[in-house]
Amino acid sequence: MRTAYFDCIAGASGDMMLGALVDAGLPADKLEAELSKLHLKDFHLHINRVSKNAFSAVKVDVHVHDDAPERHLADIVKVVEDSSLSAQVKKTATRIFTRICEAEAAIHDSTVDKVHLHEVGGVDAIVDVCGTLAGLEALGIEQVRVSPFPLGRGFVTGAHGQIPLPAPAALALMKGCPVAGSTIDAELVTPTGAAVLSEVADGFGPIPPMALKSIGYGAGSNDLEIPNVLRLLLGDARSGSHLLTET
């Protein structure tokens, strides 16, 4: 069974997931071809190899030329549904953005239809989510497993001012998933990272037994005291091998 294991060394975010997929063997032109199916013309990818604390990793940046400042769920769903992506990618992407809106609505005592998505409603977030899903599909992944999520601490500035870390939306999206605190003063798992990995994960725990085929490192934006990378292991695992935590 073709397996992907996301090792959240320094957390997970949209750019880290895309970078890890490319470094593990997803051709950059294949990723760009899949993203062209979104029919969004106002962005392009910058894909570069960088060093994070002496770790060679791939950094994927989504450069947006002209983006709407905020979107509602219906706006995002329309972009996804109007795309030429596979039916499964559309279905999963819609579920991911719906969960994000539900988390935001609960935090701000609002309703899903009234939630304005700021950081996770832009073209870059749509590209991150759909690109990750399409990339997993293109690599023929049949099973996804994820390490426990590491949680940073401190504060970040968002659309609603100072936000404590872990960000409330990200934390809500990690319900039911194993987490572990850290002493790192930074946002490690973003709402996009939490939503995507918690949705696609078939289980959480240590690296499963598998015949390892390739390894990829996706770079985050910040420079931390640890390598700011998300590690992706691709291999073939025996069907039915043990899951520490099933989802």
Image (spheres, rainbow, N blue to C red):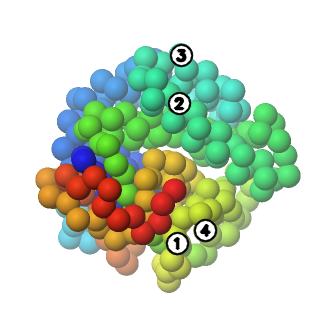
Figure check: 180 above or below 13: below
In the picture of the structure, the residue carrying the numbered disc 3 is: 82
Secondary element type, mark 1 = strand
Q: Residue at x 58, y 33 (%)?
A: 94
Which residue does the image show at 66% across and 60% down from the upper left?
A: 172
**Residue under numbered circle 2:** 91
Q: Which residue is mark 1?
A: 179
For the residues labelled 4 and 2, the Cα–Cα distance comes to 28 Å
Disc with the residue nearer the chain's start (1 vs 4): 4
Crowding near the residue tagged with mark 1, few <14, some 14–19, many ≥20 C-alpha atoms within 10 Å? some
- Kindly tell me whether residue 230 is visible in this rendering: no
In the image: residue 92, left or right of residue 17: right
Q: Is residue 2 something that shows in the picture?
A: yes
Circle 4 residue = 166
| Residue appearing at x 39%, y 64% in the figure | 243
Q: CA distance from mark 3 to mark 4?
A: 34 Å
Q: Of tags 3 and 4, which is closer to the observer?
A: 3
Indicate the amino acid at tag 4.
Pro
